[in-house]
Image (tube, rainbow, N blue to C red):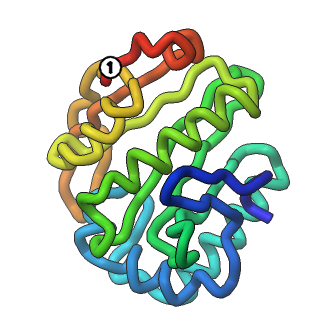
Amino acid sequence: MTAPQELRTPRLLLRSFESGDIPAIVRLAGAKEVAGTTVHIPHPYITADAEDFIARMEAEYRQGSVAGFAITLANSREFCGACGLHLAPLQQRAELGYWIGVPYWGRGLATEAARAVVEFGFYTLGLHRIHASHFAANRASGRVLQKIGMRHEGCSREHIMKWGRFVDLENYGLLVGEFQSGTGET
């Protein structure tokens, strides 16, 4: 099991990853547009990558370092992406990560999933801080983070090497008190 429970939103069911997700993960994460906006997704993306991803999520969940969720549409259970927290329990913080398959872009699904996972992190896991970053050129991801209330905390210049070139990362963070009071960015 890679997620401690199911999370439901008006349009989504966030659940543990299953072996049956592998073909959809390969197809969706394998899109160059998705891989190009993430640090860890390679391109091309093959079945072994998806199998390794699910196995890693399971192992890291058992170790207490990840709470990862498959994003599915609530009405059809159709797999459309992934969202999760990389946990630092001793520091009561986590890094939020997510990706959505290209056919599902522009529908607000990443925002809906990220908000549910952040709420889970604060209220169920008892986290104090959740942070996230995105490639500077990926403005859509920045909008997701702003919509869930995260505050822009700065830019890490040429922080990541992606496909042979250095990429700037825009950094965001949110404290539990800001989330509870709604004082983060919106």
Q: Residue at x 80, y 65 (%)?
A: 1
Rendering quarter of residue 38: bottom left
| Residue found at the very far right of the displayed protein | 62
- What residue did someone put label 1 on? 185
- Horizontal placement of 26 versus 57: left or right? left
102 up-or-down from 47: above or below: above
Q: Nearer the viewer, residue 154 or 128?
A: 128
Residue 5 horizontal/vertical position (percent): 77, 53
Looking at the image, residue 170 sits to the left or right of residue 127; the answer is left
Q: Position of residue 24 (x, y in %)?
A: 48, 83
Q: Quadrant where the C terminus lies?
A: top left
Query: Front-most of 134 and 110?
Result: 110
**Number of marks drawn:** 1
Question: Element type at marker 1?
Answer: loop
Q: Residue at x 51, y 75 (%)?
A: 79
| Image location of residue 163, percent across then percent down | 24, 64
Q: Where is 79 relative to 97, above or below? A: below
User: What residue is at 44 percent from the left and 60 percent from the top?
Assistant: 40
Residue at image location 53% in from the left, 37% down from the top? 95
The correct choice, above or below, for 69 with respect to 97 in the image is below
Amino acid on which disc 1 is placed? Glu
Mark 1, residues whose alpha carbon is within 10 Å: few (<14), some, or many (≥20)? some
Q: Position of residue 48 (x, y in %)?
A: 57, 86
The quadrant holding residue 17 is: bottom right
